[in-house]
Image (tube, helix red, strand yellow):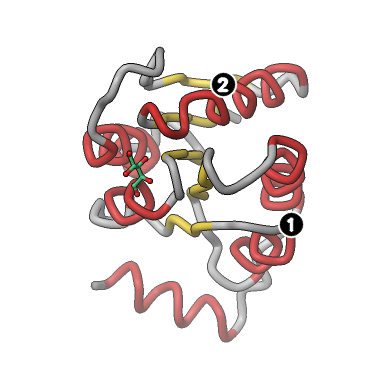
Amino acid sequence: MIIAVASDHGGFALKDAVKLHLLEKGIEVADLGTYNEDSVDYPEFGKKCAEEVASGKADKGIVCCGTGIGISIAANKVKGIRCALCVNEEMAEMASKHNNANMISMGGRILDTETALKIVDTWLNTEFEGGRHKRRTDMLDAM
Ligand code: RB5
């Protein structure tokens, strides 16, 4: 499995912590930037990561900005992307179970690293339930 990660400056430190966490678990990571805390624009990085997932180059994507909001909006503009903004483990669980989220978004200025890494693990370890939820995610994908 390849996971693409990206952030703006507000999510840079969290993105790097997530990257390290994934590498320690033996997961291949494609780091699409940003690579320091200089100010950049989150739409560019959300789009880049989403396109990596939508094209199939990466299996899933994780994006971070200050709140996680802007970069999730950017990612969800790309067809085929279901990017879920997560602030706790329950949201991460539901993002997989009900929404089959192929990306998650988190806020570097909102979350502590420990919570963020639990969100990542919960999202990765939870299966999509399918059934009635599949009909709804199909509706999303058709938009
Ligand atoms: C950048 O200052 C900040 O606006 C951005 O990281 C993010 O929080 C936007 O949603």
Give residue 134's position: percent from left, percent from top.
52, 76
Mark 2 neighbour density, 10 Å: few (under 14) some (14–19) many (20 or more):
many
Q: Dot 1 corresponds to which residue?
A: 126
- The residue at 57%/48% (across/down) is 110
Q: Which mark is nearer the camera, 2 or 1?
A: 2
Q: Quadrant of ligand 1?
A: top left
- The residue at 40%/13% (across/down) is 36
Q: Nearer the viewer, residue 40 or 73?
A: 40
Give residue 59's position: percent from left, percent from top.
50, 38
Q: Nearer the viewer, residue 86 or 128?
A: 86
- Residue type pointed to by label 2: Asp
In the rendered structure, find residue 68 and report the number of the disc placed on it: none
Mark 1 neighbour density, 10 Å: few (under 14) some (14–19) many (20 or more):
some
Q: Dot 2 corresponds to which residue?
A: 16
| Mark 2 C-beta closer than 8 Å to ligand 1 | no
Which quadrant of the rendered structure holds the N terminus? top right
Q: Quadrant of residue 76?
A: bottom left
Give residue 94's position: percent from left, percent from top.
65, 68
Give residue 84's position: percent from left, percent from top.
49, 59
In the displayed structure image, the side of residue 77 where residue 137 appears, left or right: right
Which quadrant of the rendered structure holds the C terminus? bottom left
In the displayed structure image, the side of residue 71 where residue 88 appears, left or right: right
Relative to 45, residue 102 above or below: below
- Residue type pointed to by label 1: Thr
Identify the element where label 1 is drawn: loop
Mark nearer the N terminus (2 vs 1): 2
Q: Residue furthest top?
A: 36
Q: Nearer the viewer, residue 28 or 35?
A: 35
